[in-house]
Amino acid sequence: MEDFPGMRRLAVLVLLLLAATGWAQWPFEGKRCQVCQRPIQEPRLAVWGQGKFFDEPGCMLKFRAQELCAMEQMEFDQAAWAVDYLTGRQIPLSEALLVKAPSVKTPNGYGLVFVGTSAASDKLGGRALSYSDWSYADYQELLE
């Protein structure tokens, strides 16, 4: 079969259109939170990695602290993803900033979200914690 000029561009365009219309699913579609067992309904709050899914950052922090040793926490963090609350963009967990945003209602009431930039945290009226800050913090203090 002959390779028609522009065929690859057309294929890419079709895939992009399918993704834009909702054809592409999030990896947590139809999943339940590992900690609270609630269905994951708000994509902007989701965190996932290593076959584990969380409906909000608070549940993920609880899981890390209660179920994983320090080495396993680091491995999970390097493999996991979060969603930037403001942009809806997937970001590596190890690059995500954690924000306590009292104005944001989360399923368990923790009010924690991940964002990709400190400017985004300003929009939410909260203080951004870098990975090195939130990953070593006492998770109970973060959840208060």
Image: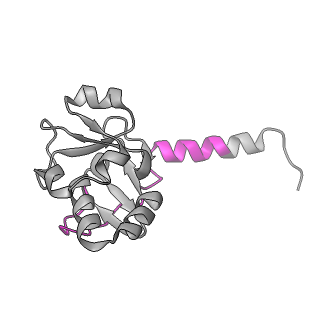
For the residue pair 118 and 87, the one nearer the viewer reads as 118
Residue 74 locus on image (x, y percent): 42, 62
Residue 33 visible in image: no
Indicate yes or no whether the magenta region holds residue 31: yes
**Residue at (13% x, 35% y) in the render:** 103
**Residue at (27% x, 49% y) in the render:** 45
Q: Quadrant of the N terminus?
A: bottom right
User: Dividing the picture into quarters, in which one does residue 49 lie?
Assistant: bottom left
Q: Is residue 130 above or below residue 82?
A: above
Residue 93 locus on image (x, y percent): 40, 51
User: Dividing the picture into quarters, in which one does residue 124 lie?
Assistant: top left
Main secondary structure along the magenta-highlighted residues: loop
Q: How is the image coloured?
A: one colour
Indicate yes or no whether the magenta region holds residue 98: no
**Residue at (46% x, 58% y) in the render:** 78
43 left or right, relative to 92? left
For the residue pair 8 and 64, the one nearer the viewer reads as 64
Q: Residue furthest right?
A: 2
For the residue pair 2 and 109, the one nearer the viewer reads as 109
15 left or right, relative to 116? right
Residue 127 locus on image (x, y percent): 23, 34
Q: In this view, does 122 lie above or below 80?
A: above
Residue 2 locus on image (x, y percent): 89, 51
Q: In this picture, which residue range is highlighted in magenta?
A: 12-41
For the residue pair 74 and 17, the one nearer the viewer reads as 74
